[in-house]
Image (cartoon, grey):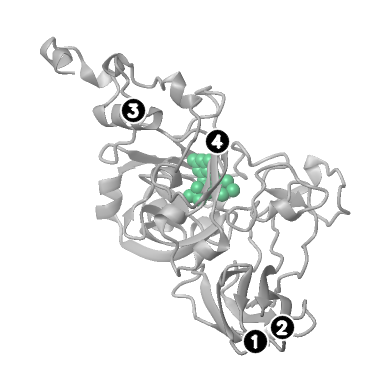
Amino acid sequence: MEENLETGFNRRRFISKTALASFATLIGTDIVFGHHLPKGIVPVGITHYDQNGPLDGKSPYITILNDRPVNAETLPHLLNDDLTPNDLFFVRNNGIPPFSIDPSTWTLTIEGVSASSKKSYTIADLKSKFANHTLNITLECGGNGRKEFNPPAKGNQWSTGAVGCAAWTGVKLKDVLNDVGVKNDAVYIGYYGADTHLSGDPNKNSISRGVPIAKAMEEESMIAWAMNGKDIPVLNGHPLRLVFGGTPASCSGKWLEKIVIRNEVHDGAKMGGQSYRVPCDAVAPGTKVDDADMCIIEKMPVKSLITSPKTGATIKTNQSLPLKGHAWTSSSKVNKMEYSIDFGKHWKECDITEPENRFHWQQFGADVSFPKKGYYEVWAKATDSDGNTQPIILPGWNPKGYLNNACHRIAVKVV
Ligand SMILES: Nc1nc2c(c(=O)[nH]1)N[C@H]1C(S)=C(S)[C@@H](COP(=O)(O)O)O[C@H]1N2
Ligand SMILES: [Mo]
């Protein structure tokens, strides 16, 4: 490195020391001639590395579904905290995350036919020009629960763990959009992130989705640089990401570099075809649906998760069982939380906290007692302020297995 400087060689054309160090960590050994590696070239050993052991910045207890791209979810009992710790927050990647990230030079550009100007902001600009906010927002992958659909749907076989709630710190998206200027004909925003397509083709995006302009302008729609008071983990979009509650988390663009303000529905990667879409009208399980009859998912349904005890808990007949969990919705809030110990025949009400802000998942609790020894299941069911309730077994089947908000169930043995 020094040699390059002495010979006056322009060091900036080469990969930075920090990027080299993170390459080395991923490979598990030094990259001997790493200082010769031109910027923009990712070592092949990295694009094909095998994932053994914990993911970068993640707990060893997180469940890894795939390693290329990285997808990992969290078991229900590990989601017991009001705010999900960064190392336990699920990861859903469509491509390869950027390896060389320098927050001090990172810029976000906003442009588009429905933008009155084109502006770029560094993270320092965002921090100083706009009011900073911290909101507790739940992110849930549109495919969370896909595993249960029958006939099965292709895609990551998420169980219940592609969800988490964190305290996100950043600025309101609407403050930044207003600074750029939004024309009256604006319909949608689209995002572009710094991750690369799995094929390695720099002209392809792994994903480029967005939200209707009305959603972008909501009070809780954010551009965030911190998660639970710390840097966002690289796998969750460090140094900058979008955060939208109540929509599929695929709208919340990670490694955010660009936002376009469009006068039509954004048509980036994974906006069209069957991606993040469900049949506009309900279909029988197994039906093939034409792309033209599929509608974009703009809202996530009401849902809940029992986070304590862990399924399989054993208690004594004279004991009561403290039940705990979270409930969330895209409407204003969850109004009612119930549980059943007799497979849904009778329901009893749980206590539930108020959300600190919209999209903050709410905490429910109950003391459950059982009439006699035996095997039981505890089922949990949330009802939101729009009157929507979770289905007991499965919601309507759809070709890609989205929006499974069935009641969560745990097994309990009373001895
Ligand atoms: N740039 C970029 N943003 C992205 C993705 C991605 O692959 N690349 N995945 C999306 C999907 S499908 C989901 S569910 C969420 C997951 O966020 P997380 O990995 O922080 O949990 O990020 C969304 N934002
Ligand atoms: Mo997702």
N-terminal of the pair, mark 3 or mark 4, is: 3
Label 4 beta carbon within 8 A of ligand 1: yes
**Of the two numbered discs 1 and 4 in the rendering, the one whose residue sits closer to the viewer:** 1
**Label 2 sits on residue:** 373
Above or below 169: residue 14: above
Q: Secondary structure at mark 2?
A: loop
Q: Residue at x 29, y 30 (%)?
A: 21
Residue 319, by quadrant, is: bottom right
Q: Dot 2, how many residues are within 10 Å of its Cα: few (below 14), some (14-19), or many (20+)?
A: few
Camera sees residue 217: yes
Q: Secondary structure at mark 4?
A: loop
Label 3 beta carbon within 8 A of ligand 1: no
* Numbered tag placed on residue 317 in the rendering: 1
Disc 1 marks a residue whose amino acid type is: Thr
Disc 4 marks a residue whose amino acid type is: Pro
Disc 3 marks a residue whose amino acid type is: Ala
Are discs 1 and 3 less than 8 Å apart at CB? no
Question: Percent x, y for residue 414?
Answer: 67, 80
N-terminal of the pair, mark 2 or mark 4, is: 4
Q: Residue furthest left?
A: 6
**Label 3 sits on residue:** 24
Above or below 329: residue 100: above
Distance between the alpha carbons at the discs numbered 2 and 3 = 56 Å
**Label 4 sits on residue:** 69
Q: Dot 3, how many residues are within 10 Å of its Cα: few (below 14), some (14-19), or many (20+)?
A: some
Above or below 295: residue 85: below
**Of the two numbered discs 2 and 4 in the rendering, the one whose residue sits closer to the viewer:** 2
Q: Dot 1, how many residues are within 10 Å of its Cα: few (below 14), some (14-19), or many (20+)?
A: some
Are discs 2 and 1 less than 8 Å apart at CB? yes
N-terminal of the pair, mark 2 or mark 3, is: 3
Label 1 beta carbon within 8 A of ligand 1: no
Residue 340, by quadrant, is: bottom right
